[in-house]
Image (cartoon, rainbow, N blue to C red):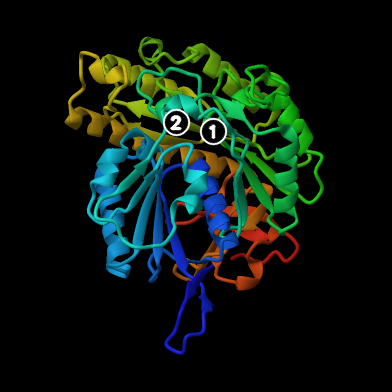
Amino acid sequence: MFLKKPKNGEITSMKKKVAFYTLGCKLNFSETSTIARNFQEEGFDRVDFSEHADMYVINTCSVTENADKRFKNIVKQAQKANPNAFVAAVGCYAQLKPEELASVHGVDLVLGATEKFKITDYINDLSKNDFGEVHSCEIVEADFYVGSYAIGDRTRAFLKVQDGCDYKCTYCTIPLARGISRSDTLENVLKNAKEIAAQDIKEIVLTGVNIGDYGKGEFGNKKHEHTFYDLVNALDTIEGIHRLRISSIEPNLLKNKTIDFVAQSNSFVPHFHIPLQSGSDEILKLMRRRYLSGLYVDRVARIKEVMPHACIGVDVIVGFPGETDELFLETYHFLNELDISYLHVFTYSERDNTVAAEMDNVVPQKVRSKRSKMLRGLSAKKRRAFYESQLGSIRTVLFEGENKEGYIHGFTENYVKVKAPWNPELVNELKQIELTKIDEDGLVRFNFVAEKVEV
């Protein structure tokens, strides 16, 4: 709470307003939400980023292409809303290049990996600084865990269970931005899950940097007191959670017993997002991934064996150094023949202080763009085929809270996106439906099972 002395001499309290902008992954959204709650505990009111606020906090991402350009544009948005507002940058990009962000006109404060959760300690007042002030640790000091989750602005919550990564993929800066792999305690994860369930949020998405590594660093050491399998077992017993969804998990850490558990789970849904990055073993070795394509085939086959209706998403990178036309086509044909549901396609871009940035046989930008376009087309084809395979089936949809051009949208348990005319009474409701047809925009229409009225 900030104090203001009006003309009559009496001191009154006056709440300040703070707004947040989040770039990047679900993990960043969960951390922004926790940081926002810290501000609210200090007496701030949270407002939308487009509104007039006294302070703007930008949670940055190191994976985002043209991260510096995007950041500058977001700072300009804040200054347009309030030229005198205090602007702070936190997150991965703030850890990797703090001086670069601090030099951007209008930025007052830059906080690194260990400082971001203590942001309210760094603001005595909200007076503008002549130059951006930097507080950023050496990344080896980011060895402690801060739990977080996102609630309040959507029908699902992102629950952080793990942070950091011990993998050394040659293209990735995440270990430099977030530090070593470490986990929340199982007790605290369950506590946070219960808090989310108590707020009538129907779905929880488990998130982290490398969630399959859950348990490492749980009590400040490298031993696994618990495993990811222990985690999903424990979460499945909590009352009030309707859906639990696993976000991205490495194929070498997705064990068969976890897949089999999800298949018969009370709460976990049949949806997996499994990074591949390349269908070429030669490229996977250059990337220093911890598996080859054969293991990935086995994981997909096991999922489809026990959950034929499961949705499987794939991350893939195109244009990595050394990716010839032949090796790219190897990836394309590998994915085309695989029983997957959609792709997240990333065009490779060089990152400072990574091994890949120094590699030879650089792929021209035009070639990278062409390959990206080809895989995005394949993704559309895969998604359409998956949706068609689900027509006529009975599913449960969770409706979301946004009115998009007169329609309400939602996702089934196996991640089929559906649409219906806007009806506020459906928001945050779970409804049983029959999938009937694919719309012209690629979404699925349906009948409510009880009513048999097509929408």
Q: Residue at x 75, y 63 (%)?
A: 450
- Per the image, label 2 sits on a secondary structure element best described as strand
- Marker disc for residue 248: 1
Q: Amino acid at mark 1?
A: Ser
Q: Please state the horizontal and vertical placement of residue 377, each as a whole percent of the image.
A: 35, 38
Quadrant assignment, res 374: top left
**In the image shown, does 238 or 31 lie closer to the viewer?**
31
Quadrant assignment, res 198: bottom right
**Image quadrant occupied by the C terminus:** bottom right
Q: Amino acid at mark 2?
A: Asp
Label 2 crowd (10 A; few <14 / some 14-19 / many >=20): some
Q: Residue at x 40, y 37 (%)?
A: 92
Q: Please state the horizontal and vertical placement of residue 78, each as a whole percent of the image.
A: 32, 62
Q: Which residue is mark 2?
A: 315
Quadrant assignment, res 343: top left
Q: Please state the horizontal and vertical placement of residue 419, each as a whole percent of the image.
A: 54, 60
Give the spatial CA distance, label 2 vs label 1: 9 Å
* Image depth: mark 2 or mark 1 in front: 1
Rendered view: 113 above or below 292 = below
Q: Residue at x 70, y 46 (%)?
A: 192
Q: Earlier in the sequence, mark 2 or mark 1?
A: 1
Asked if one can make out residue 380 in the rendered structure from this viewpoint, the answer is yes
- Per the image, label 1 sits on a secondary structure element best described as loop
Q: Are marks 2 and 1 in contact (CB under 8 Å)?
A: yes
- In this view, the residue farthest toward the bottom is 8
Label 1 crowd (10 A; few <14 / some 14-19 / many >=20): many
